[in-house]
Amino acid sequence: MSKRDYYEVLGVEKGASEADIKKAYRRLAMKYHPDRNPDDAEAEARFKEVKEAYEALSDPQKRAAYDQFGHAGTEAGFGGGGPRGGFGGAEAFSDIFGDVFGDIFGGGGGRRGGRRVFRGADLRYRLKIDLEQAVQGDTVQIKVPSSRECGECDGSGAARGSQPEGCDTCGGVGQVRMQQGFFSVQQTCPACGGSGQVIKDPCRACGGRGRVREEKTLSVRIPEGVDDGDRIRLSGEGEPGENGGPPGDLYVEVEVRPHPIFTRDANDLICEVPINFAAAVLGGQVEVPTLDGRVALKIPPETQSGKLFRLRGKGVKPVRGGSRGDLLCRVTVETPVNLTREQKEILEQFEASLNKGGKRHSPRSSSWLDGVKRFFENLG
């Protein structure tokens, strides 16, 4: 089966620059990588094809031979490009292949001063706040565990009078090359953890880590409208990086404590408002709480238990912008308790007067009873 043109495989023009070829390879290698396409034979074949094309076009000698003689120019023993399909001498290929693996698996390592550097780990802090703080916003102080450079060894991790030594396993580069099937990859050195150095006489103060634990106080601004489960990111406040790498971030996860009066539903607040029997029948006015103070709520005559009243603009301002929510007041008619004999007699007289009026005083109850009656008649 004839091979496709290498430029066609990578989707670039014949005169493409090295940067364009590298960019095309990165994109296709990530797209067809076997770890991203498990059990996909077609993707695996495409990955091998892309790898072979890049290997030829990324090497100036191989590319020149390919441009002049086609695929025959890349065969073993033809010209000075090295063995076909091999990795010897193709340092540029190893470098980009490591970059691709970093993109695929989230690697954050780089190099500084010849040493492998690593970004610090992200940290999470669970912050409990009151509903008032979540709705109105606030600034709070938190204490989080952290680390700083050890003063005893000046961050080297080695005891005074000694120094870290180059790792024999990786030769001080922090990476080792592993052959896996048809390709080879670079992996973090297991002996030195990627630092390129080993400490034979560790510092007693920090145990060879070069850092000591401490606690730091941070100021966290809570924006208006945050909700339970929202996260606030404090950039650079996570674990320090290794070998001069950048620090990670601190994610403050908000947990809103239950409120004795209000519950929250998206941008609305809900509260229960108990009223007595007389206020429900005759109507009236009650004071209800809001997070901004007290307001008067008018109760119309003949209000039923469970009726919902809406106070617009008394809810929560969305954290990402938009109109403020409402306060929903659900009234519940409270049954009187601990009645005196006289009060009971008055209620008995009142009930008797209601019965004389027939269904017009209790339409919902009468409708429900009629429905029950029809239900049992249908059963018969």
Image: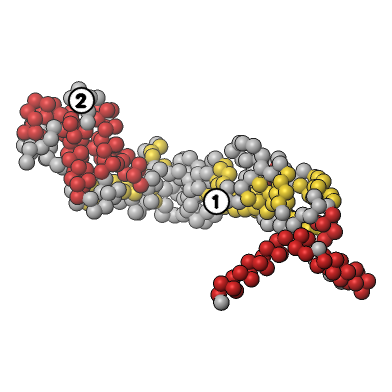
Q: Nearer the viewer, residue 141 or 24?
A: 24
Is 273 rendered above or below residue 134?
Answer: below
Can the viewer see residue 41 in this picture? yes
Query: What residue sits right under mark 2 in the picture?
Result: 13
Task: Identify which amino acid the numbered label 1 is placed on.
Answer: Arg
Q: Nearer the viewer, residue 129 or 209?
A: 129
Is 197 rendered above or below residue 61?
Answer: below
Query: Residue 116 falls in which quadrant of the image?
Result: top left
Quarter of the image with the N terminus is top left
Provide residue 62's location: percent of width, then percent of height: 14, 31
Query: Do labels 2 and 1 touch, CB within 8 Å?
Result: no
**How was this image coloured?**
secondary structure
* Real-space CA distance between mark 2 and mark 1, rounded to the nearest whole angstrom: 48 Å
How would you rate the neighbour count of disc 2 (Cα within 10 Å): few for under 14, some for 14-19, many for 20 or more? few
How would you rate the neighbour count of disc 1 (Cα within 10 Å): few for under 14, some for 14-19, many for 20 or more? some
The reply, left or right, for residue 272 in relation to residue 175 is right
Please report the residue visible at 61 percent of the width from the left and 69 percent of the height from the top.
374
Q: How many marks?
A: 2
Provide residue 356's location: percent of width, then percent of height: 82, 66
Task: Identify which amino acid the numbered label 2 is placed on.
Answer: Glu
Helix, strand or loop under label 2: loop
The reply, left or right, for residue 64 in relation to residue 247 is left
Query: What residue sits right under mark 1 in the picture?
Result: 124
Provide residue 59's location: percent of width, then percent of height: 19, 32
Helix, strand or loop under label 1: strand
Please report the residue visible at 68 percent of the width from the left and 68 percent of the height from the top.
369
